[in-house]
Amino acid sequence: MFEIFTVDFMQNALIAGIIVSLISGIIGSLIVVNRMVFLAGGIAHTSYGGIGFAIFFGLPIFLGASLFAVAASALMAFLTIKYKERVDTFIGLIWATGMAIGVILIDLTPGYNVDLMSYLFGSILAVETADIYTMLGVLSIILIFVIFGYRNILAVSYDSEYAHIRGINVGLFYTLILVISSIGIVMTMKVVGLILVISMLTIPVFIAEKISSSLIGMMIYSGLISAFFTIIGLMVSYNYNLTTGATIILVSVIGMILFLTIQKLFDLKNRIL
Amino acid sequence: MGKKILEINNLTFNYDNVNVLENINLSLNEKDFLAIIGPNGGGKSTLLKLILGILQTKNGKITINGQNPTQQLSRIGYVPQNTNINTSFPIKVIEVVLMGHISDKKPFFGYSKAEKACALGALSQVGMEDFANAKIGTLSGGQRQRVMIARALCNHPALLLLDEPTASIDVDGQKQIYELLKELNKHMTIIVVSHDISVTLNYANKVAYINKFLTLHNNISRFSTTPQNGHFCEVELMQMFRNKNV
């Protein structure tokens, strides 16, 4: 059953999948507790502009997408803080603009026959060793941010007004949370693509929320649950020759439904007995 | 009378050129218990935000212990309205209380032993020490309100501000909260914004009615001696205030 991981590219996929699961567990938790899911979707789609940018100018795709994602998240953070009540309109706008720029830039690239699908639905099977080092670097940055900023992140996420009174620079931390998340989102996109990134960021977190009583616990559980779904998804997609990103998401959804059903049954049992 | 702790002089505040507060004067001594009442939109929350330094004064002056509010943040405890929001947030009671520590003396990461001990002390002051490791969402409204009070007590404030502390709590819970405030009042000045007149009158020694202007009543015990059926209607009380000298 596990012999598929003796194949070279499957080994890379497995390692990348686990690293990205840990990344998405951490930033997914931050995104969900700060109610930034729509923002995260906006960042993911805007970074398509960065993919077009990278292809047009012959830069590494990761770099282009990350630059666009960081710029978009900084802009969104600024707008969210400044014009709170209009934020959904702005996100929609940035979202669409980013994608349009990406499509046009790829049109303008001579002779480039781009495989759009691999960006929309991920290309975990094409992960190279260099990509794995990039992912490890991003994971380290995120870990450093979360470990050293934990109490401020917690205060700003739970009760930003109170954090302000306690002298914490709320705007700065809000922006940092978003910018760091945006780099994580780009990494997650490599595995499941920009269309499905939202579900990878939310489904494991949704399950973890029910079993954890602290933010750090939620991050750890989400990472582990996400890794579990990714490994199962990889194996299923390999055996049945299915698109990996989509398979991972469907495995996650089935896992979530199973979890919720079992939880309901336990509740029922506890009420009857 | 004790030492003066809060002093507000000729304060006028406006949003978009509409005056919300006009010519407010107020002075509180140590261990005063002030209840602020008044209609919605009358400026109660704005005044609290000005005292907390969330909003900046443009005309007039607020001093706490003789200083600007932002310099005295560590001496102010604040219990916000709506402690029922965000109840699905994965956070332990103790972590909520630890948030109360002022941020400039924090360790490199995590929380120091002294901070944890202090937070547990604050929890036991409000009778919630057994819930330190419970998830905040599993508590009742009254219990959660106590935790928020503990958070405000974390930095040993001289002035405690509470915005509608009993708005979403059952009657027993309300009485417990006010008994707790009475205990705390022995050590600190308290300001409560509340619609809950019958309770407020039994504990406050000053009442301020705010509707753009502020009317202060010292020594309100003469009101509380004759409550009808043990309860005061807020409307009646506001009328009494208005008839007197507005």
Image (cartoon, coloured by chain):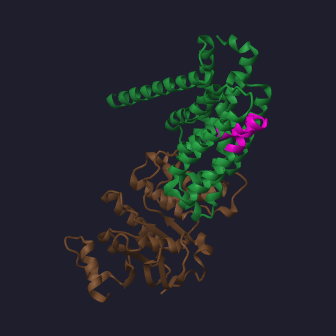
User: In the displayed structure, would residue B58 be above or below residue A33?
Assistant: below
Q: Is residue A196 magenta?
A: no
On screen, residue A9 versus residue B156, left or right, reads right
Asked whether residue B98 appears in the rendered view, the answer is no
Q: Which residues are magenta?
A: A46-68
The residue lying at 63 percent from left, 48 percent from top is A178
Q: Residue B120's image quarter?
A: bottom right
Q: Residue B158's image quarter?
A: bottom right
Measuring from the top left, give residue A13's x and y in whole percent: 70, 22
Q: Quadrant of the C terminus of chain B?
A: bottom left
Measuring from the top left, give residue A64's x and y in whole percent: 73, 39
Asked whether residue A39 appears in the rendered view, the answer is yes
* Nearer-the-camera pick, B109 or A200: A200
Return the residue found at the far bottom: B245
The residue lying at 70 percent from left, 31 percent from top is A19
Which one of the lettered chains is coloured green? Answer: A
On screen, residue A268 versus residue A258, left or right, reads left
User: In the displayed structure, would residue B136 be above or below residue A163?
Assistant: above
* Nearer-the-camera pick, A229 or A190: A190
The residue lying at 79 percent from left, 26 percent from top is A129
User: In the displayed structure, would residue B94 be above or below residue A109?
Assistant: below
* Nearer-the-camera pick, B190 or A251: A251
Q: Residue A50's image quarter?
A: top right
* Nearer-the-camera pick, B89 or B147: B89
Name the tint of chain B in the rendering.
brown
Q: Is residue A67 magenta?
A: yes
